[in-house]
Amino acid sequence: PSMMIAAVILAAAAPALLEGGHAEAHRTRVHLSSGVTVEYLDRPAIADENFDKTTASYRPPLLLLHGWPDSVRTFDLLMPHLDPRLRVIRVGLRGFGGSDGAQGMPPIPGGGASFTIEQMAADVRAFIDALGLRTVYLGGVSFGSFVAHAVAAHWPRVVNKLVLVAACDVATDSVKLQAAARALALERPEWVKGSADLTPAFVSSFQASVHGNDSSTVPTSFLASTIVPQSLRAPLAVWRASLASLLADDHTAILTAQLAAPTLLISGEDDSIFPPVVCGARLRAAIPTVHSHVILPGVGHTPSWEAPAAVGKAMSAFALNEDPSKVAGGLLVHSSATVEWEPSLDASCGLGERSPADAAQHHFTAGLRLALGFDFVRATEAFRHCALAAPGCAMCHWGVAWTLGPSLNHPAVESWMVQAHRAIWRAKELHAAVVKDTPALTANNSSAVAGLLVNAMAARYSIPNPNASELPGLTRAYAAAMEAAATTVPSDAMMQFLAADAQMNLGPWDYWADPPLGTTFKPHGLKASVFLRRALALEPKHAGALHLWIHLLEASDTRVADAAAAADVLRSLWLDAPHLLHMPSHVDMRRGRYAECAAANTAAAALPL
C-alpha cells in the first residue's frame, strides 16, 4: 500500500537556468512519512519561455539513488550529460550526506537496524509521495541500485522505468565488499578514529580501489573535495549497518517475481565488485523486462565518475524512448530492440520563420505517441504544451482537437467536443495565414499535409456544441474527409492510419457482415483494412496501425490468426505503453494462448495508467 503523503519542505528556491540551457539544481531537505528527513537536489527540466515552466507531467522525473557510502553529490560529474529535457532529482539515503542519521544531522533511533535496504526503499516511496509525483523513472548506482529495484518490486505502479548502474542481484559473493566489512569491524587506528568515525585515509583508499584500470579517468579533485568529505559524513555505524544489509539480503526472488518495469543495465567492463560477466548475466536472467545492457570498456565500478558522458547519454536515451545502446565506446551485450519505431508526423507545418522550436516538435511527437497508445488525456496535455511552445503552429491545435474527440474505446464527451471545436478552428485560422503567404504547395509538402488533416478534423467539429443526433453525421463527414486526404497522400503512413481510424469509428467493434465467422467485411471495415494494409506496408512497425489491425481482425473466427504477427510486434515495441502491451492478449485469448495472454496483461498492469 502507498504511504500517506506527509511532507514538510524545509527550504525552497526558484531554480535558475545555467549557460547551455541546463537548470540549476536546488538543494533542500524534506520530511517523510517514514519518519526521517532526507536531502535532495532537484534540477527541473529545461523550459522554453513560451510554455509552462514546470516539468511536463506526461514525462516522469528521473530519480537517482547514490551508492555506498556516497551522497547526492556523487552525480556531480554525470549531471551535465543528462538531457536537459529531463527533470532530475537526486535523493539522499538515510544516514548519508545531508540526510538524517549522518554526521551533524538528527539521529535516527534504532541503531544499525534502522539502515537496511528495505527501510531506505520505504523512504524513497515516501519521498515520491512527499513531492506529489505520480510515477518516476528510477535510477540507482551500486548500493542505490539495490534500493531502486526494491522500490520497483514493492511498488511497481510507481516506477515507469528502471536504470541499474554497477548492479548485481546479490552482493554476498563480492570479495571486495566482504573485505570492506572485515576492515570496518577491525577498528584499526589508521582507519577509525574515536571508534565512531572513519579516517580520510581509509575512505580515500576504499574509493580509489573501485575504479577501472585507468584511475586517471576520475578527477582527483572530485575525489578529494567531494567524494571523500561526503563519505565521511556517514558515521561508522551507518557504514557497517548498511553494508551488512547489502551483504545479507538476497533480492533474486523479488527480481524474478515482481520486477516489471522496463530496465536498462549499465556496467563497467572492469568492475571488480560486481563483474558484469557474472552479475550482468544473472540480472538479465532474473529480470524479464531488461531492455538493454550496455557495458563500458575500461570502466570499473563507478561508471558515472569514469564515463559520465556515456552513462548520461544512455540514461537520457532510455528515458526519452530512444536507443540507449548507441553509446560511443559502449559494448552492447543485450537489447530487446524495443525502440524501433516512433511517429514521424511533422509539426512544423511549413511555417518557415514561424516554425516551432525543437521543444514544440518534442511535445508534438510525445502527444502522437501517447494517443497511439490510447492515453488520450496525457496526449491532449502534450499537444497543449506544443501549442504553448509554438503558438503559431496549426498542427499543435489539430492534436488537441484529435485527442479530445471520440475513439474506439471512448464515446464523445460534450465538454470535450466544445474544446475540440475551438482548437480546430484556431488551427484553421493559423493554417490559412500560412497558405496565404506560401507559394503553390506539392502534395507531400508538410503544409499541404497539415491542411488536409486540419480541414478533415474541421469536418468532425463543424458544429460548436453538437447534440447526440448530430454526432453520427459529423463522424461520417470526418471519415469521408480523411479518406480523401489519405488518397491524396498515399505515401504517408500516418495519413493512412488516421483514415483507417476514422472508418472504424463509423461503427466501433462492428466490422463484419457475418460475425462471428468473419469472412466478409462491412463497408467501413473493408475500407479500414485497405488503409491499414497501406500503413503497415509503408511502416511495418507503425504502433497505431498494428493496434487497429488487432481490433479489426479479433472478432473474426477465420481471420484472427492474421493478427498474430501484429500482436507479437506490439509485445516489445513500446514497453512503457500499457495499453499497447495489453493488446496482444486480444489475439492470445481468441487463439487459446492463455499463458501469453496472462503475461501480456501482467506486463501492462505493472505500469501506471
Image (cartoon, rainbow, N blue to C red):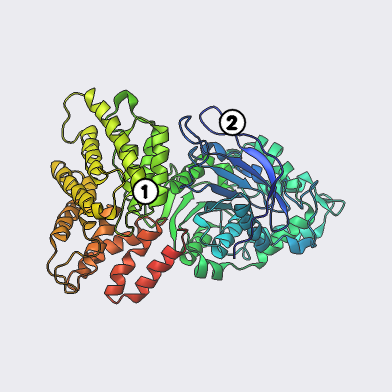
Does dot 2 land on a helix, a strand or a loop? loop
Residue 400 visible? The answer is: yes
Of mark 2 and mark 1, the one earlier in the sequence is 2
Residue occupying the point 67% across, 35% down: 221
Q: Quadrant of the N terminus?
A: bottom right
Disc 2: CA contacts within 10 A as few (<14), some (14-19) or many (>=20): some
Which residue is label 2 attached to? 16
Residue 541 visible? The answer is: no
Percent of width and height locating residue 107 = 80, 54
Percent of width and height locating residue 491 = 17, 43
Disc 1: CA contacts within 10 A as few (<14), some (14-19) or many (>=20): some
Label ID, residue 416: 1
Residue type of the residue flagged with mark 2: Ala
* 233 to the left or right of 574: right
Percent of width and height locating residue 154 = 57, 65
User: Toward the viewer: 201 or 597?
Assistant: 597
Q: Quadrant of residue 603?
A: bottom left
Q: Quadrant of the C terminus?
A: bottom left
Label ID, residue 10: none
Q: Is residue 97 above or below residue 355?
A: below
Residue type of the residue flagged with mark 1: Trp
Does dot 1 land on a helix, a strand or a loop? helix
Give yes or no for contact between labels 2 and 1 (Cβ–Cβ under 8 Å): no
Q: Quadrant of residue 513?
A: bottom left
User: Toward the viewer: 360 or 433?
Assistant: 433
* 152 to the left or right of 522: right
Percent of width and height locating residue 460 = 25, 46
Tell me the mark number nearer the camera, choosing from 2 and 1.
1
